[in-house]
Amino acid sequence: MGRLLALLATIVLFAGCGGHDVSGPMAPESAAVSMPGFSFTPFTTTIVVGETVTYDFPAESHNVIFAKVTGAPADIQETTNQKVTRSFLTAGTFPYDCTIHPGMSAVVVVR
């Protein structure tokens, strides 16, 4: 009986000893913008510094041209049938347009 209790105590002791967390830093989050018809959806994308936005280009040709604002990522030239990602490393408001389709505008807000 004593051995059984000792064995059970040892099992309980080791069961309570979980391993340490070995996961590395979390990967940046990502937001997505689609282009149904002649609009960006969503109109406003809000992320935090270091996160990315993935632009999902349909078969219809579009581009993403950012306003000349300090910290804005590189423009995306005329593209079709691809997903293109941009990282935002500076806080701010970054308006952009598809210059191929007048009135097709949106904004990324980085906090």
Image (spheres, rainbow, N blue to C red):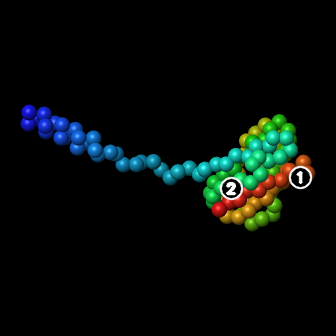
Say what amino acid the circle numbered 2 marks.
Thr
On the question of residue 8 being in view, the answer is yes
Q: Residue at x 68, y 55 (%)?
A: 46
Is 100 on the left-hand or right-hand side of 45?
right
Q: Is residue 28 above or below residue 70?
A: above
N-terminal label among 1 and 2: 2
- Which structural element holds mark 2? strand
Q: Is residue 72 above or below residue 1?
A: below
Residue 46 image label: 2
Extreme residue toward the bottom, this view: 70
Q: Residue at x 79, y 59 (%)?
A: 95
- Which structural element holds mark 1? loop
Q: Return the x and y of residue 23 as percentages of the image width and height.
A: 45, 48
From the viewer's side, name the closer residue of 15 and 55.
Answer: 15
Q: Return the x and y of residue 1 as percentages of the image width and height.
A: 8, 33
Marks 1 and 2, how far apart in space?
21 Å
Q: Return the x and y of residue 33 as percentages of the image width and height.
A: 74, 46
Q: Return the x and y of residue 31 as percentages of the image width and height.
A: 67, 48
From the viewer's side, name the closer residue of 78 and 45.
Answer: 45
From the viewer's side, name the closer residue of 56 and 82.
Answer: 56
Q: Is residue 48 above or below residue 13?
A: below
Say what amino acid the circle numbered 1 marks.
Gly
Dots 1 and 2: beta carbons under 8 Å? no
Q: Residue at x 36, y 49 (%)?
A: 20
Extreme residue toward the left, this view: 2
Location of the C terminus by quadrant is: bottom right
On the question of residue 73 being in view, the answer is no
Per the image, the residue denoted by label 1 is: 103
